[in-house]
Image (tube, helix red, strand yellow):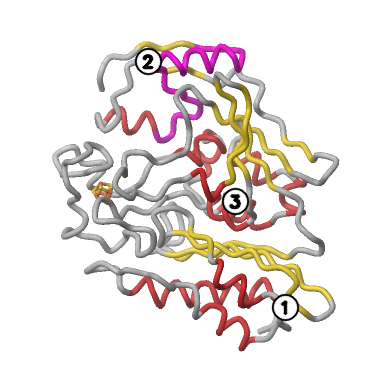
Amino acid sequence: MEPFTYTRVSGTRDAVAAGQRGGRYIAGGTTLVDLMRETVERPTALVDITGLPLRDTTVAADGTLRIGALVTMADAAADPRVRTAYPVISQALELSASAQLRNMATLGGNVMQRTRCAYFRDVTAACNKRTPGAGCAALHGVNRAHAILGTSEHCVATHPSDVAVAFAALEAGVRLLGPDGERTVAFRDFLLPPGTTPQREQAIHPGELITAVEIPAHPRPLRSGYLKVRDRQSYEFALTSAAVALHVEGGVVRAAKVAAGGVGTVPWKLTAVEQYLTGKPPSPRLWRDAAARAAGGARPLEHNGFKVELLERTVERQLRIVGGTR
Ligand code: SF4
């Protein structure tokens, strides 16, 4: 670990000022400290934000659910307002990490967490995300767990968060506070695919601080859930996952919100699946035909071609579970 300074702040403006001076925010520390120990991350100044008043969950008059950035994964998953309105969020959180980590890790940190690509975490391996221009060892290395959607020749790493997949499906927004005030960035624009700059992972400016995640109101009734497929049933990242929310009324799918994890360089919104579902009566055939559109545009690597069929089957199964027509 490299030497660094440590500052604790109690006000959001002080935090932003410290961030502007180059400080890295730290809350639960469940990712950053590991990366610092391995010298993958070498911040020279840490800004402890655990004292900031960002631990509230509220529901606005228009129905927007606002979860503070410092709410822990465990608390967000257990919140009755989250569990009742959006089981997909609670399930995604409870299928993540371990109980100990969920008690420490915050929602803001979860969204900002870095990839689990083994080459990224091995400082002896070539990695454009860690060292721009160095190359990508995963392209011709062991890439079974890597992405098939949203990749570039510069990086093929998946985004590791489960709850971010639920947020993408539900078209959440990320609330930011910066030197110039507050703004909300739509989730689909917040996490960035690698393109030619894989080292840039979020649409966030220097000094900006995540203050909350906002989930807009969706038509009711809304049934939702999260399915995660992985090599073992605990403490493992997704090979594929599906976040599904369906508004079915009058015997027809009125609205469908669907996203996939474990397959994209960012949580992957399945717009073609959503469009195919909308306006049609639920049936096993509908789930199958919609899921067949999940992997459009996929570009498998040497070891992860299995993800194409696995993704389609994961989406079909979760549509059946949430849609209730088996
Ligand atoms: Fe680095 Fe991305 Fe290549 Fe992994 S896939 S080695 S994170 S550039």
Q: Which of pointers 1 and 3 indicates the residue nearer the eye?
A: 1
Q: Which residue is mark 1?
A: 279
**Is residue 324 depicted above or below 147 in this figure?**
below
Residue at 53% over, 55% down? 165
The amino acid type found where label 1 is placed reads Gly
Q: Secondary structure at mark 1?
A: loop
Residue 183 in percent (x, y) is at 62, 32
Q: Secondary structure at mark 2?
A: strand
Magenta span includes 215:
no
Q: Which of pointers 1 and 2 indicates the residue nearer the eye?
A: 1
The quadrant in which the C terminus is found is bottom right
Q: Is residue 145 left or right of residue 140?
A: right
Q: Is residue 172 left or right of residue 249?
A: left
Specify whether tag 2 is near ligand 1 (CB below 8 Å).
no
Magenta span includes 13:
yes
Local packing at callout 2 (Cα closer than 10 Å; few below 14, some 14-19, many 20+) is some
The image's mark for residue 45 is: 2
**Nearer-N-terminus badge (1/2):** 2
Outermost residue on the left side: it is 124
Q: Which residues are magenta?
A: 8-31
| Depth order, front residue of 113/265 | 265
The amino acid type found where label 2 is placed reads Ala
The amino acid type found where label 3 is placed reads Phe
Residue 217 in percent (x, y) is at 76, 51
**Mark pair 2, 3: CA separation:** 30 Å
Q: Which residue is mark 3?
A: 167
Residue 250 in percent (x, y) is at 84, 78
The mark tally for this picture is 3
Quadrant in the picture for residue 69: top right
Pointer 2 with pointer 3, Cβ within 8 A: no
Residue at 64% over, 55% down? 170
Residue at 67% over, 29% down? 55
